[in-house]
Amino acid sequence: TRAEPKLGKEPAAWLWLAQLQYSAGALSAAERAAAKAPGKNADLIAAETARTRSFIGFPAQPLQEREPEYVTAALAAHEQIDKGQLQLAVAKALELSKKFPNAPAAAVVQCRVKSRGKSVAEIQQACGEAAKSAPNAFLPQYILGLAQSAQSRWADAEKSLSRAIEIDGSTREVWASLAAVQLKQNETAAARASQATYKERFGAALTPMLWPRGWAAH
């Protein structure tokens, strides 16, 4: 950005810029700025930018100056899902796909919308497409794992859930689902290892649970 050449080597200035850029949806710029401001706060910003990338789904090609527009539009669509406004979320996803036809964020939104329904087939189709277009996105892998569990495809579910954790292991529900799937396959040692890893990372016990609250596709 234009401000970067003027900041010199002052860590506090770079941290301020990183926070500002992250808030504006300029994730790549925020990552660059955070890298020049070593410390806990900069590490937190870097972690949040990575988490936002994996949540939205980023294209292989850089978005350059349109990145803030892409991030803001994608988060706005997800906000409608959080509010239960699924039709509005779909409308925003369609608008996003028109503005960014080769980017995967719209497919990730569609995957999440379908996960609120009861049709495992529709979930698999939407999330399968999203996983192909955004292989480093968390939600398609996680939701595919839940759908595969609903079909008792335990090995496939374990693979998808494990991949979701590789992408972003900060969500309790995905760990709980993984441990439950491992128990379904009589992989007691693996389930205990998942619980132990979770406790080591987050300092809390983990109760295996196949599906999160609100999951309706059984």
Image (cartoon, helix red, strand yellow):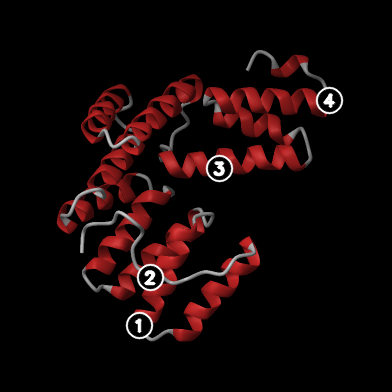
- On the image, the x and y values in percent for residue 43 come to 70, 42
Question: Of label 4 and label 1, which has the lower sequence position?
Answer: 4
Q: Quadrant of residue 150?
A: bottom left
Estimate the spatial distance between the alpha carbons at disc 3 and disc 4, rounded to whole Å: 24 Å
Give the residue drawn at x 26%, y 53%: 128
SS at badge 4: loop
Give the residue drawn at x 35%, y 68%: 210
Q: Is residue 196 above or below residue 74?
A: below
- On the image, the x and y values in percent for residue 97 come to 28, 28
Which three-letter amino acid code belongs to the residue tagged 1? Gln
SS at badge 3: helix
Label 1 packing within 10 angstroms: few (<14), some (14-19), many (20+): some
Q: Give the number of the mark in front: 3 or 1.
A: 1
- On the image, the x and y values in percent for residue 202 come to 62, 61
Q: Give the number of the mark in front: 4 or 1.
A: 1
Which three-letter amino acid code belongs to the residue tagged 2? Glu
Identify the residue under disc 1.
185
Label 4 packing within 10 angstroms: few (<14), some (14-19), many (20+): few
Label 3 packing within 10 angstroms: few (<14), some (14-19), many (20+): some
Q: Quadrant of residue 89?
A: top left
Q: Is residue 10 above or below residue 189?
A: above
Give the residue drawn at x 72%, y 24%: 16
Identify the residue under disc 3.
50
Identify the residue under disc 2.
158
Question: Of label 2 and label 3, which has the lower sequence position?
Answer: 3
Which three-letter amino acid code belongs to the residue tagged 3? Ala
